[in-house]
Amino acid sequence: MYILGIESSCDDTSAAVIADGGLLLSNVIASQKVHEEFGGVVPELASRAHQQNIVPVVDTALRRAGIDKHQLSAIAFTRGPGLLGSLLVGTSFAKGLSLGLRIPLVDVNHLHGHVLSHFVKRMPDDRVPEFPFLCLLISGGNSQLILVRNYNDMEVLGATIDDAAGEAFDKCAKVMGLPYPGGPHIDRLAAEGNPKAFRFAKPHIPGLNYSFSGLKTSFLYTLRDAVKQDPDFVTKNQADLAASLQATIIEILLDKLRKAVQQTGVRTVAIGGGVSANSGVRRAVADFCTERNLEAFIPERAFTTDNAAMIAMAGYFKYLDSDFCRYDQVPFARVTV
Ligand code: KG4
């Protein structure tokens, strides 16, 4: 069995092929550089770049997998959430290919893809999580704590009520004058800084929900006041600011993760989404699990950002359930788990 996955929800065009059991045969990602000068993703430009990339990306994925398109069993694609124009490119392409090859079409919720990325295998005997497990899904658009009971049974226990963790990284990085997306820059600078140099506000939100907008405001005001005294404040304190910001975000994330583990009693914790590429987050979650004798699943960095391997994986499970997509289905910009 071979499943082709197609991902085009934001600014990465990706195609991947997985074989039976989730064995990854190829995962091709074309990133779009065109947005850098605008300080964020420009939807119109993203859709156009997807149109340029989609055919060569799918072609390369099939070639690297060493298979012909006629050997495919199904086409899985990201139906949402994401940018509608971007999603339309992947959706239309997937529909066309599925019709042309006369094989089933499977729609995938992008967030399910992130959660199920832990089942993608590089080698047949790679370790995968056992159900139930908790997944901390942290990206530029989402911050959620998800109880994963099965491939097709997920419950959001908590989510952000305002900004996502990735937005906190990116918006604070912007205030520091760093390029977009700022998360990786903060990560790099934080490695050289003192995480206790500055203190920023932390939210007091009941339950398992997150909030990051207060931290963003506190960070902005700290810098604004300090720059009045010393115009070179940010340049002089770049590493300490980054380290302190990252440490605060990690504390906020771990505080609710701790509560979720207590409430659910689950013994396995996974992380996913773009922010799970952060070195400090990865270390903190790994340490958190070691201290409590929990099993940790920290994804390979290639699977933290948008990729079609996770879409093919989620599609594989739906394919096994014969859970197919009709041709009149449309993409959706917003959806939860
Ligand atoms: O999952 P993702 O690729 O897509 C969106 O949801 O948009 O996540 C992108 C987010 C951005 O906010 C980016 O700054 C953040 O993930 N990110 C990081 C790191 N790498 C990516 N944040 C902190 N540290 C990193 N190393």
Image: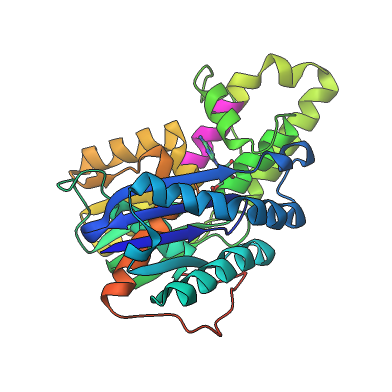
Image location (x, y in percent) of residue 201: 61, 42
Image side of residue 10 versus residue 287, left or right: right
Q: Say whether residue 140 is left or right of residue 256.
A: right
User: Where's the N terminus, which quadrant?
Assistant: bottom left
x, y percent for residue 204: 54, 54
Q: Quadrant of residue 54?
A: bottom right
Image quarter of the C terminus: bottom left
- Residue 147 part of the magenta-drawn span: no
In this rendered view, identify the residue nearer to me: 164 or 54. Answer: 54
Give 292 or 201, whichever is nearer the viewer: 292
Is 73 situated left or right of 206 in this image? left
Q: Would you identify the image quadrant in which residue 112 lies?
A: bottom left
Residue 140 appearing in the image: no
Occupied quadrant, residue 264: bottom left
Residue name at image x 32 percent, y 63 percent: 71
Residue 218, relative to residue 76: is it above or below? above
- Please give the name of the residue rendered at 54% of the width and 72% of the height, measured from the top-left corner: 96
Near-viewer residue (66 or 209) = 66
Is 248 contained in the magenta span? yes
Residue 137 in picture, x, y percent from top left: 44, 54
Instruction: State the residue at coordinates (60%, 29%).
Output: 185
Q: Position of residue 147 (x, y in %)?
A: 33, 65
Our reading of the magenta stretch's main secondary structure is: helix
Q: How is the image coloured?
A: rainbow
Q: Quarter containing ligand 1?
A: top right
Residues rendered magenta in the picture: 242-253
Relative horizontal placement of residue 191, taking residue 290 as reference (left or right):
right
